[in-house]
Amino acid sequence: MKIGELSTRTGASIRSLRYYEEQGLLAPVRHNNGYRDYSPFAEEQVRTIQLYIGLGLSTEQIADFLHCVLKNKEAFCQEILPVYQQKLAEIDDQIYVLQTIKSNLKERIQSILDEQSANHKEKVENE
């Protein structure tokens, strides 16, 4: 199958498919004319890559275990659990940072509202 057909079937852009190839995640056969020819299995490969990208994993991380998960269940791939655990820890850290920022913003908003309210009361009392 040609790159355009694979793109249509999977929803991945042609640019993404070329990037996946550059990262070693896809390996199409190259013809003398330079055209890529993907096996029917490539569709499943791309969908698997998209799944892991959707989980927030990098193509480098995916490359470390992709071959295994395409042949076995995730549970049988020793490489994947540490990647998942690391990603979860990163997400927890990001959530903490975002919660801190949210709390700080709420405090700043409340401080501004309180100050505006105090200024308004002062103006009313002075009139």
Image (tube, helix red, strand yellow):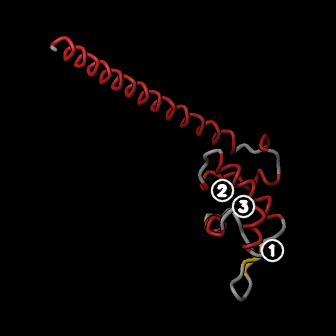
Q: Secondary structure at mark 2?
A: helix
Residue 63: mark in rendering: 2
Disc 3 marks a residue whose amino acid type is Gly
Tell me the mark number nearer the camera, choosing from 3 and 2. 3
Q: Is residue 84 above or below residue 58?
A: above
Residue 48: mark in rendering: none
Residue occupied by mark 3: 11
Where residue 23 appears, as percent x and y from the top left, is 61, 63
Give the Cα separation between the discs numbered 3 and 2: 20 Å
Nearer the N terminus, badge 1 or badge 3? 1
Disc 1 marks a residue whose amino acid type is Met
Name the image quarter holding the N terminus: bottom right
Q: Secondary structure at mark 3?
A: loop
Number of numbered tags placed on the structure image: 3
Q: Residues within 10 Å of mark 1 (few under 14, many from 20)?
A: few
Residue occupied by mark 1: 1
Nearer the N terminus, badge 3 or badge 2? 3
Give the Cα separation between the discs numbered 1 and 2: 23 Å
Q: Of residues 118 and 100, which is closer to you in this image?
A: 118
| In-image side of 76 versus 87 (left or right) | right
Q: Of residues 69 and 127, which is closer to you in this image?
A: 127
Residue displayed at 63% across by 42% down:
83
| In-image side of 104 versus 1 (left or right) | left
Nearer the N terminus, badge 1 or badge 2? 1
Residue displayed at 30% across by 24% down:
112
Disc 2 marks a residue whose amino acid type is Ala
Image quadrant where residue 22 sits: bottom right
Where residue 36 appears, as percent x and y from the top left, is 72, 77
Image quadrant where residue 13 sits: bottom right
